[in-house]
Amino acid sequence: MEAQLELSGAHLRAEDLHRIAVLDDVAISPDGRLVAATVRTADIDANLYRSAISIFPVDGSTSWPLTAGTTKDWAPSWSPSGTRLAFLSDRGGSTQVWVIGIHGEARQLTTFPDGVSERPVWSPDGRHLAVVSWQQNDAVSGDDAMASDADASIAVITRTCYRIDGQGYVGNRRHHIWIVDSETGLTRQVTDGETDNYEPAWSPTGDRIVFVSNRVDDQIIDF
């Protein structure tokens, strides 16, 4: 391969990397005929990455873009019927869950104040989604409040894991699991408290959820 590149005069340059589309978040439809994947590209002028979701037929026929990718769309998740996908998008300013049909228009499903942090998970009957969202902890101590009032630039750290790669400082936020109606967007919180809870998975009957949580006193790694 190296000899062929030298003979043809084709050399990989740094700017060529900006034109490479990266595939990620691959999800196979329930019937095994379609693959949804995130396609990430670089926007040099804006100095950021944009991502869109595309559909790739397994038989190798023509693929098509499902979302426009003007911002960041990622983490596609097929409904059990294979007629809809839930995905994450920051097109509204914060990361929320959106739902779209195979050839339809996307609609925003959630409006969590601090956004959604993980791929949504469909219930077996397709009626609900398990969603992980940041939630502010309102139980701030008196000392914390005094420090904040005295100097807004002071950050009071009360936990061992106080920042996360890609997230920055987490403050008083915790990850909690919510159940979201896939049609109406109505939400119901299922975890709370001073722990982080994430990676939910439904039981086959849809009446229980298992999840990961670190509930020891000194949470050295709590995400």
Image (cartoon, rainbow, N blue to C red):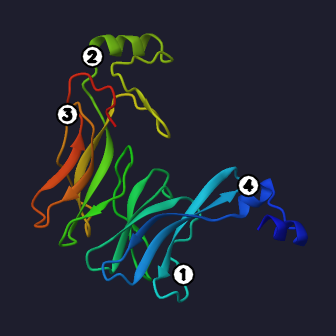
Q: Is residue 207 left or right of residue 163?
A: left
Residue 94 locus on image (x, y percent):
46, 50
Which amino acid lies under the numbered mark 4 shown in the image of this protein?
Ile
Dot 2 corresponds to which residue?
141
Which amino acid lies under the numbered mark 1 shown in the image of this protein?
Trp
Q: Quadrant of the N terminus?
A: bottom right
Dot 3 corresponds to which residue?
193
Q: Secondary structure at mark 1?
A: strand
Dot 1 corresponds to which residue?
64
When asked about the image quadrant of residue 169, the answer is top left
Which amino acid lies under the numbered mark 2 shown in the image of this protein?
Ser
Q: Is residue 146 left or right of residue 193?
A: right
N-terminal of the pair, mark 3 or mark 2, is 2
Q: Secondary structure at mark 4?
A: loop
Residue 129 locus on image (x, y percent):
25, 62
N-terminal of the pair, mark 4 or mark 2, is 4
CA neighbours of label 2 inside 10 A, class few (<14), some (14 to 19), many (20+) = few
Q: Nearer the viewer, mark 1 or mark 3?
A: 1
Q: CA distance from mark 3 to mark 2?
A: 15 Å
Q: CA distance from mark 4 to mark 1?
A: 24 Å
60 over 154 or under it: above or below: below
Q: CA distance from mark 1 to mark 2?
A: 52 Å
Q: Of 169 and 104, which appears nearest the observer?
A: 169
Marking on residue 16: none
Q: Secondary structure at mark 3?
A: loop
N-terminal of the pair, mark 1 or mark 2, is 1
Q: CA distance from mark 4 to mark 2?
A: 45 Å
N-terminal of the pair, mark 1 or mark 3, is 1
Dot 4 corresponds to which residue?
44
Which amino acid lies under the numbered mark 3 shown in the image of this protein?
Gly
Q: Secondary structure at mark 2?
A: loop
Task: State yes or no: discs 4 and 1 in contact (Cβ < 8 Å).
Answer: no
